[in-house]
Amino acid sequence: MKKIMFNDRYGLTQAVLEGRKTMTRRIVKGVLLGHVQNGMPGMAVVGAPYKVGEVVAVAQAYRDMNVANDSFGSKWLGTDFGQAWRNKMFVKTEYMPHRIRITNVRVERLQDISDEDCIREGIKQITTSPYQHLNGIGYTFNGWSNRGTGYSSDTPRGAFAALIDKVSGKGTWESNPWVYVYEFELVNSL
C-alpha cells in the first residue's frame, strides 16, 4: 500500500482526519502529454502517483498515533520507534491507522483552482478578529504565524495562494505549474 503525506506544520494532516480537507494538489514532475478530445485540446492524466479507487495510507509519525491505546495492542510493547517516533517518513504503511480513497484525478494549472476547491483543500472561513476583513469574513489556514499574527485573506484563493507558497516554496503560486488534482474521501481507519 502507498502512503501520502500532508503538511503537519500547517494543519493539513489534521484537516484530512477531521474531514475538512478532501482534495490535494501535487505538482506534476516531468512531461504531460497533450491530447485532443472532441476537437478540444486538453491534458492527459499520465504518470499520476495515485489512481482513482486506490486506497492510500495517511502518513503520521508514531507520536501522533496514540500507540498506547490502539488496535495494535501488545504489538507495540518493546518497540524501538527510533526516527519514526517524530518522522512519518520512517513509519511503515501497515501501521498507519488512517486511509483515504482516491475518488477523482485530473490535471490543471494551479491557479485554475476555484473558491470551493480552496475550501476542500483545507482553507477555513473565519469571522473573528484579527482575521476578518471589511466584509466581516476572512479565510486562513492553520499553523501560519509571523510574530504572533496570523495570515488571512478576503478570498479563499488568496489564502490558498499563501498556503501553497508556504508548503511548496515561495513563488509556487506565481509560477502556476501543472498539478495533479486528487479528490478523496476518508475511509475506515484500522
Image: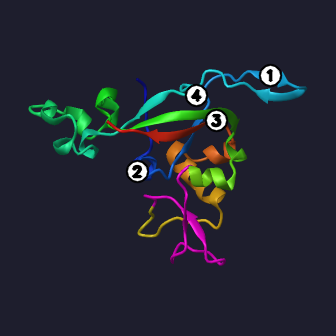
Q: Earlier in the sequence, mark 2 or mark 4?
A: 2
Circle nearer the viewer, 3 or 1: 1
Circle nearer the viewer, 4 or 3: 4
Identified at 50% across, 46% down, the residue is 167
Asked whether the residues under the numbered discs 1 and 4 touch, taking CB atoms below 8 Å apart as contact, a structural biologist would say no
Residue 120 image position (x, y, % from top left): 57, 50
Mark-to-mark CA distance, 4 and 3: 16 Å
Query: Is residue 71 shown left or right of residue 8?
Result: left
How does the figure colour the protein chain or chains?
Answer: rainbow
- On screen, 3 above or below 31? below
Q: Which residue is mark 2?
A: 14
Identify residue type, mark 1: His
Question: Which disc number belongs to residue 143?
Answer: none
Q: Which residue is mark 1?
A: 35
Mark 3 packing: few (<14 Cα in 10 Å), some, or many (20+)? many
Q: Which residue is mark 3?
A: 179
Q: Is residue 28 visible in the rendered structure shown here?
A: yes
Q: Which residue is mark 4?
A: 52
Q: Earlier in the sequence, mark 3 or mark 2?
A: 2
Residue 97 image position (x, y, % from top left): 32, 37
Identify residue type, mark 2: Gln
